[in-house]
Image (cartoon, helix red, strand yellow):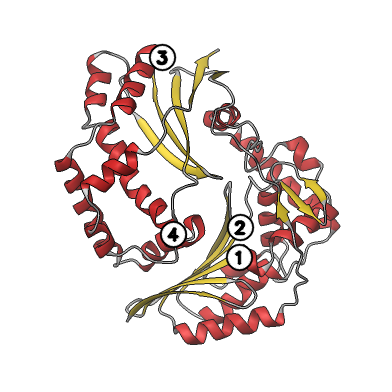
Amino acid sequence: MKRNKVITLDNGLKIVIYQDNTKHSMYAELIVNYGAINKDFNINDKEYHICDGMSHFLEHLLIEHSIYGNSLQYFKKNYIESNGLTSSRFTKFYIHTVKDFEENLERLIKVVNVPNFNKEDIETTKSAIFEEIKRSQDNKFSEFNILKNSCLFRNINYKTVLGSESELSSIDYSMAKLCYDVFYQPFNQTLAIAGNIDIDKVVELVKSIYFDIKTEKIDYKLIDFNEPDEISKLEGSIYKDITKEYISINYKINISNFSPKDKVNLTFYLSYFLAYNFAQTSDAYKKLIEENISVDRIFFDYNFIDKFLIIQIGTYTSEFDKFIILITNIIKSKKFNLEDFEVRRKRSIISLITREDNFINMIKPFISNVSDFGYNYIDEIKDIEQFNFTDYKNMISSLDFSNYCITKMLKK
C-alpha cells in the first residue's frame, strides 16, 4: 500500500507522511525552520541579533550532547543510519532503519526536543566546529559564496552556515539556550515519515511523545529583512591561489507574487529552461567552445532565499567580457523550444515513475514542497501531464532578470 498525507497537530507540528508498505525500511526526518539566515528576531519588543553560525552550532550541540549521549554514536551502535544538516533556512535531523522504528522515532524526537546541554558542553562543541571551519577554508568556493551574497543582498547579512572562528567564540550558554527555546518549538517543526509504516499508529505515537514533552510557548517575530529587489553591488572579486579563473553571473528575482503551486511548477520549468539554454547540448555551450571562451562546461544552479529566486551561471575562463555578453544575451532573448520542452516533460514523468522504487526519493521532494513552498501535496504524474508549453513560456517570461551581479575568482 502506498499513501501520502500531511497532518498538522494542535501544537502546530506538521507531519508529512509517505507510506510504502512494499519496502522493509523506515525513514524519519525532523526539520526545524531555523537556518543560517534567521539571525534577527523580536520578543516583547526587544530585538536580538545573533552571530553567524548559531543554527549550525545548535545542530552539533543537540546531536553531541543529547539525553542519549552522542546520538550519532548511539544510533550507529544500534545499526541505525543517522545524521544532521544545517542550511541557510533549515536544520534537519534524520534516522533510517529497518528495525524498531517507533522506538527510534521517539529517540529522534527527544534528541531534538529534550535539550540536555550545559555550559561545559558549549565549549566542547566549539572545538569540533573550529576544525570544520578550517576545513571549509580549503574550499575555494566558500569565500566565493560569501562574496556572491554580499553582492546580491543589502539587508540579508548572513555570510556562511558555519560562521567564523571569532563569531563562534562569542557564543555562550544563554545565547544558545535562547535560540533553542525560540526556534525549536513544535509549531516551527516538520516531521517527515516514510516507508513501511502504519500511518494511524505512528501519528498517535507522535502525538503522545509531544504531549509528554512540556514546552513553554514563546511568541517571537523574525525581523523583516526589507530586502530590495536591487542588488547590493554590480561586481566583486576575490584573489586566490588558483590555476583557472572563474566567473559567475548571479540573478536576483523577486517571486513573492508566486503561489505555492506556482513555485513548485517553477522548479520544473526553470530546470527545463536552464538546461535547454546552457547544458552541453546548447547553442551557448557550442559558442563557448568555438570562440575559445572556455574549455569547461557552463555551470548553472538556483536556490531560494527569503522572497527571492537566485540563479547562478558560471564557468572557468579569463574571457570575462565575452562570457558576460554570451550569457546576458541568451537570458534577454529567453529562447524556448517546443520539442525540447516535451522531451524534458516526458523525462520528468519517467523520473516520477522510477522514483517510486525508492520511498526516500518520494519523501524528499514531498518534504521540499511542504517546507520550502507551503504546498502540502506530493508531486504526481498527472501534475506533470498538465504542464504545457504556453504556461512554461509565460512563467519564465514573467521573471525579471534585470537585477544581477558579477562575481569573479582571480589569480593572485
**Tag 3: Cα neighbours inside 10 Å, few (<14), some, or many (≥20)?**
some
Earlier residue among tags 4 and 3: 3
Tag 1 residue: 189
Amino acid bearing label 3: Phe
Looking at the rendering, in which quadrant would you find the N terminus? bottom left
Could you say whether the residue bearing mark 4 is in a helix, strand or loop? helix
**Mark 1 touches mark 3? (CB < 8 Å):** no
Count of residue discs: 4
Relative image position of residue 336 (x, y in whole percent): 22, 36
Amino acid bearing label 2: Asn
**Tag 2: Cα neighbours inside 10 Å, few (<14), some, or many (≥20)?**
many
Relative image position of residue 29 (x, y in whole percent): 53, 66
Q: Residue at x 74, y 50 (%)?
A: 41
Q: Is residue 191 above or below residue 58?
A: below
Earlier residue among tags 2 and 4: 2
Could you say whether the residue bearing mark 3 is in a helix, strand or loop? helix
Tag 4 residue: 369
Q: CA distance from mark 2 to mark 4?
A: 14 Å
Relative image position of residue 202 (x, y in whole percent): 51, 82
**Tag 4: Cα neighbours inside 10 Å, few (<14), some, or many (≥20)?**
many
Residue situated in front as seen by the camera: 152 or 46: 46
Please give the label number shown on residue 33: 2
Earlier residue among tags 3 and 2: 2
Relative image position of residue 319 (x, y in whole percent): 38, 12
Amino acid bearing label 1: Gln
Q: Is residue 317 left or right of residue 30?
A: left
